[in-house]
Amino acid sequence: FPSHDILVVKGYTSLLTADPKFMNLNIHSADNSKMAYESIYDAISKHVIYDLILIDLDIVSSRLSPVSSGKQLVLWIKKLMPETKIILTTRNNEYLLVYDIWKVLQPDGFAVKMDLNTNSTIDMIYQVLNGFIYKSPFVEECICKIWENETLVEDYNRKIIYFLNMGYKTLEIQALMSISQSAIQKRIVKMNKAFGVVDKNGLLKEIKRLRYYRDWE
């Protein structure tokens, strides 16, 4: 269980060891990306494959680790342990970012922390270990919300919105995304039309109003 909070790790461990369904589990834990990398690398060197790895995407980064984020850790595990099931948790509650995590990392289970309690955590782990895909209620809501507006299903459009919100100009976005400035402008115009606004400022305000990005202030 790589997590940013050792108390969270201990909580997961206590939950599982107290439940009869998980009595035979051999549990390892880490509270930063370096510890997680070393634990997994050690397992690989001993030809040990984990059945399940639960990763807190808010995990503390370490400059000393070859994998400096939860996302990099997931991609590394998928490459070296392709049969290992992966569950992700995050405190993030923004529709676009939660959807991107689900689509890009394709975990076996994914939960926003506000959805988790004792029963739902046990149920999530049990379902994934038994071959089911688990999405917590808010993750389901995010996926449905994105599909309500099909312009946001396109990866380029979501990236453009992200960069616009960060304050980048279209010329700067062109360099970051390796697509032409005219293509970016056409996509912005298309999204403006879909959201019933006339410019990129209106687009960002409407996306905030509709809570695609919940935490924008």
Image (cartoon, rainbow, N blue to C red):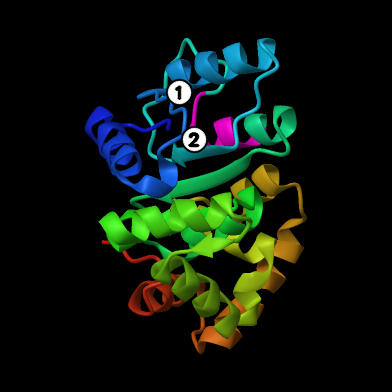
Q: Main secondary structure of the magenta part?
A: helix
Whether residue 112 is visible here, answered yes or no, is no
Q: How many marks?
A: 2
Residue 110, label in figure: none
First-in-chain label (2 vs 1): 1
> Quadrant where the N terminus lies?
top left
Q: Where is mark 1, residue-wise?
A: 33
Residue shown at the point (59%, 53%) measured from the top left: 108
Q: Is residue 73 magenta?
A: yes
Q: Where is mark 2, residue-wise?
A: 70
Q: Is residue 140 above or below residue 162?
A: below
Label 2–label 1 contact, CB within 8 A: yes
Q: Amino acid at mark 1?
A: Ser
Q: Is residue 88 magenta?
A: no
Q: Is residue 102 above or below residue 78?
A: below
Residue shown at the point (40%, 38%) measured from the top left: 23
Give x and y (percent) for residue 159. Answer: 60, 57
Give x and y (percent) for residue 116. Answer: 31, 58
Disc 2 crowd rating (10 Å Cα; few below 14, some 14-19, many 20+) is many
Q: Is residue 166 above or below residue 8?
A: below
Q: Which residues fall within the magenta stretch?
A: 68-75
CA gap, disc 2 to disc 1?
7 Å
Q: Nearer the viewer, residue 86 or 100?
A: 86
